[in-house]
Image: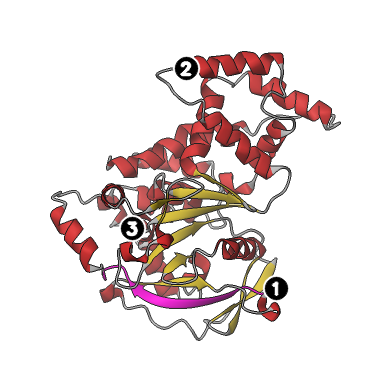
Amino acid sequence: MRKSSSFYSILDEDKNHIRLISILPVSSPENQSVIHCTIEQVSLSDFALPYRQFVSAHNTTERNTRKLLSSWIKINSRISNHPDGGFDLSSDPSLYRYEWGDYETLSYTWGDPTDTRGIVIDGEGFRVTANLEAALRSLRLKHRFEGRYRLWVDTICIDQENLHERARQVAKMREIYAISFAAVGWLGEEKDGSEQALELLDNLASFYDPAHDFKAKDLVEKLKDDPSYLGTGCWLALCSLFERSYWSRLWVIREIAMSSSDMIMHCGGKSLSWERLCLGMGIIHRYLWQVKDSCLAYDRQVAGLNGPWRWPVRHLNKIWKDLYPISQLERRGERHLDFMRLLDLASVSECSDPRDRVFGLLALMDKRLAARISPN
């Protein structure tokens, strides 16, 4: 069993403390091959004066976090657009909501727990799964989490060997995700044409306009005539992208829901906003559900692939029919799904511990019910 690292001091629960990491840039050839981070305790109650005044002036009894954040963004036009969608807060530190800065959360799959890599945190060696190390390596290239804009990662920011802390932090995840400025969804490293798949979804999202669907209907006819109209191999890449384990993971339901549409999906070096990904899926569901099969068959033929094949329909349906609607609820301040519907979703999702089918979804339950369930 891994021992608690020396940088894990006791979290002050009365001060609403959590830990956040910064990903240090490459400073020399020696540390290029190893990820270096720093870790620090911060308080989620330590709001900066401008944001505190904004919250006070925002006269609402509901105080929905995502709605407040949307309003904060709208009145601060200096926040620049993020190239992948959403907003880039790291470019203007004067708009941080906290005295200590601001933060995002990371949504990812742990992967094989026996396949680990070494990183360095506050000068101390630390083991993480290979998939997490790849995510940190990719994010280091973007230089977003080097200063006062930080990142929350469950396996690092929670002392996994401190059972009391772990239970309290799991119960606190609703707040951690809901208050975070945005989220990073890590789908994994580039492979099987994943960049092409994200480009396809981005292109499809451009056709999404329920009020004027003539462009989408015209797209259907063009794909019937020429399955390579949007590119050769992109449908095969899309099929592979949705076969990834990320989509079957239980915890992603909570993370996407609480982050609302303020999430950027990363795969290797390519990124796409959660909103654009889902709108692309909407075009497939509304207009291309039949033609997608002929497009995939064409790509397989060009690639010389034989044998039986099928789309990962369960994941396609889960994204458009479950995850996307759930992600809109928090932003609009509407009530969450009822308890039985949440259990239905949990039953078809994967987790390492069956108790997580309840604990993993505490953040999406009615707050009165969630308050009566204590992770142990």
Of badges 3 and 2, nearer the viewer stands 2
Crowding around mark 2 (Cα neighbors within 10 Å: few <14, some 14 to 19, many 20+) is some
Report x, y in % for residue 344. 46, 39
Q: Disc 2 on helix, strand or loop? A: loop
Residue extent of the magenta highlight: 33-46
> Mark 1 near mark 3, Cβ–Cβ under 8 Å?
no
Report x, y in % for residue 376. 41, 66
Residue at the spot of label 3: 179
Of badges 1 and 3, nearer the viewer stands 1
Image mark for residue 213? 2
Residue at the spot of label 1: 33
Q: Amino acid at mark 3?
A: Ile
Is there any visible trace of residue 219 in the rendered image?
yes
The first of marks 1 and 3 along the sequence is: 1
Report x, y in % for residue 38. 50, 78
Front residue of this view, candidates 332 and 227: 227
Front residue of this view, candidates 169 and 269: 269
Q: Quadrant of residue 41?
A: bottom left
